[in-house]
Amino acid sequence: MKSPYLFKLVVAILYGTHRHSNLLICNYFVMQQEKDLIKVFLGLAEKVKSFESQLKQISLNERNPLGDTYLDTDEVCVLLKICKRTLQKYRDESSISFIQFGGKTLYKTSDIKEALEKNYQPALNA
């Protein structure tokens, strides 16, 4: 029942005989423009995320002019996907090297990598 009405409405819009045809055509174009804008914004959001990631990497690389990169507690927790308490346990057990300097705890990225490699468990060959 809706289908013949819809067909008549489309024909009326195409031929401009429906009293609201201009409004319906405008609505259609507005909806198309909104879809295009959403695509553009999603693309921009992705580029911003990529740019943010690149800036973080540059920041990490330039943080230490002495040659090695140092991470604070929060950054190490994010990197290793652990909580602060677990990181504290690793320090207490001397599983991970750290620097205590002026109330700030720092970790060399090379020390973190070394700790990970030291605790690496290779797969057993059957």
Image (tube, helix red, strand yellow):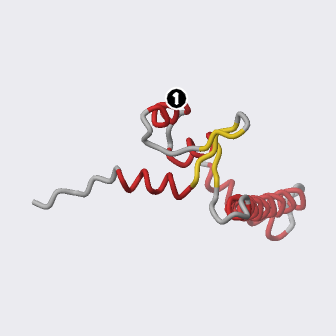
Q: Would residue 36 appear left or right of 19 to someone viewing this image? A: left
Q: Residue at x 88, y 55 (%)?
A: 20
The residue lying furthest to the left in this view is 126
Numbered disc total: 1
Residue at which label 1 appears: 85
Q: Amino acid at mark 1?
A: Arg
Q: Would residue 1 appear left or right of 41 to someone viewing this image? A: left
SS under mark 1: helix
Along the line of sight, the residue nearer the viewer: 57 or 110: 110
Evaluate whether residue 35 shows in this view.
no
Q: Is residue 113 above or below residue 58?
A: above
Q: Residue at x 61, y 44 (%)?
A: 99
The location of residue 93, given as percent across then percent down, is 42, 34
The location of residue 4, given as percent across then percent down, is 64, 56
Q: Residue at x 76, y 65 (%)?
A: 40
For the C terminus, the quadrant is bottom left
The location of residue 1, given as percent across then percent down, is 60, 48
The location of residue 72, given as percent across then percent down, is 65, 44
Q: Dot 1, how many residues are within 10 Å of its Cα: few (below 14), some (14-19), or many (20+)?
A: few
Q: Residue at x 25, y 57 (%)?
A: 122
Q: Is residue 56 above or below residue 105?
A: below
Along the line of sight, the residue nearer the viewer: 113 or 37: 113
Q: Quadrant of residue 50?
A: bottom right
The residue lying furthest to the bottom in this view is 15
Along the line of sight, the residue nearer the viewer: 69 or 85: 69
Evaluate whether residue 97 shows in this view.
yes
Q: Quadrant of residue 84?
A: top right
Q: Would residue 124 appear left or right of 111 to someone viewing this image? A: left
